[in-house]
Amino acid sequence: MSNKKIWFITGAGRGMGVDFAKAALAAGHAVVASGRDRDAVSTAVGQSNDLLAVKLDVTKRADAEAAVRAAVDRFGRIDVLVNNAASFYAGYFEELTPEQFELQLATSLVGPMNVTRAVLPVMRKQRSGRIISISSSAGLVGFEFCTAYAASKFGLEGWMESLHAEVAPFGITTTLVNPGFFRTELLTERSTNYAEPSIEDYDERRAEQLAFWKSQNGLQSGDPAKLARALIIIGSREPPPRRFVAGADAIATAEQKVADLKAQIEAHRDLSTSLAFDGEPAVRTR
């Protein structure tokens, strides 16, 4: 694979995806930048001979297939896929409608699957490729008011970790990225959808949660441009990391998760290890 790679980036019409596309172009790569509005993608990313802007609603499999065909027709290959497109449906589980929950999963879990399903035949034929999926700290730890978002990101993590073993024999790698709070458009009114208040028992805590999330918009500590440059670095490493925890706050969250898991294991170790059939070893090896 030459130093110049073909990057295919979803959700590149605004937010972090724009930074990813600009960073890849600045590093000398060619970019297929996709979004629901092709013109918005072109406007946001700018003009370049190495840029192809394509329409792609990740919830539509036909869009994914057409976008991948356009990418291959233009550049002949796809070296790096960045599953970045996402949405944020915030609210208490009981107050989120089933439709809102399904929309969250459709964009942030099924969407990356649709695009990856379209890209994999190209990468298998090449016997090379990298799939980078943008998860979240909420892919490692569940947070109050984030049931739908965390469910989509936990699903993304399990799918990607399992996919890794399936595609590794073809020279295809997978990387999960867990950003903490970055100053993106995710918390703007255009990107965040809140559940409608409907249950009095949640009133007090809901008010606190809404005040917190709305206050964070524009004040997040992470710089998306720096994350974009970091993505280009890890995208070129041999081998690339299986996981990249992005941001000091994300590292703190991950370390707390590890500590909590260890504590839970130790708290119930005797009971856990007592569950084998009598007379049989507790642990079997293949």
Image (cartoon, grey):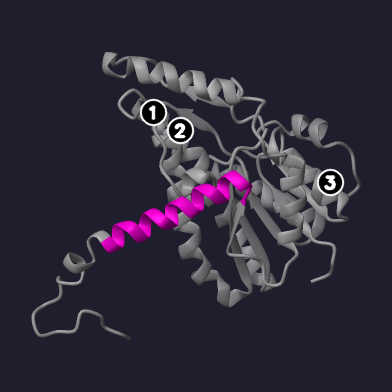
Q: Of label 3 and label 1, which has the lower sequence position?
A: 3
The residue under label 3 is 51
**Residue 7 in view of the camera:** no
Numbered range of the magenta stretch: 246-266
> Is 255 situated left or right of 236 in this image?
left
Of helix, strand and loop, which one carries label 2?
Answer: helix
Query: Please, what is the dominant secondary structure of the magenta stretch?
Result: helix
Three-letter code for the amino acid on which mark 2 is drawn: Leu
Q: Where, by quadrant of the figure, is residue 285 drawn?
A: bottom left
Q: Is residue 88 above or below residue 2?
A: above
- Work out how far the residue at label 2 is from the one at label 3, CA to CA, in angstroms: 30 Å
Number of the label disc, if any, that sits on residue 103: 2
Q: Residues within 10 Å of mark 1 (few under 14, many from 20)?
A: few
The residue under label 1 is 99
Q: Residue at x 62, y 25 (%)?
A: 217
Of helix, strand and loop, which one carries label 3?
Answer: strand
Asked whether the beta carbons under mark 2 and mark 1 sit within 8 Å of each other, the answer is yes
Tell me where residue 229 appears, x and y as whole percent: 77, 50
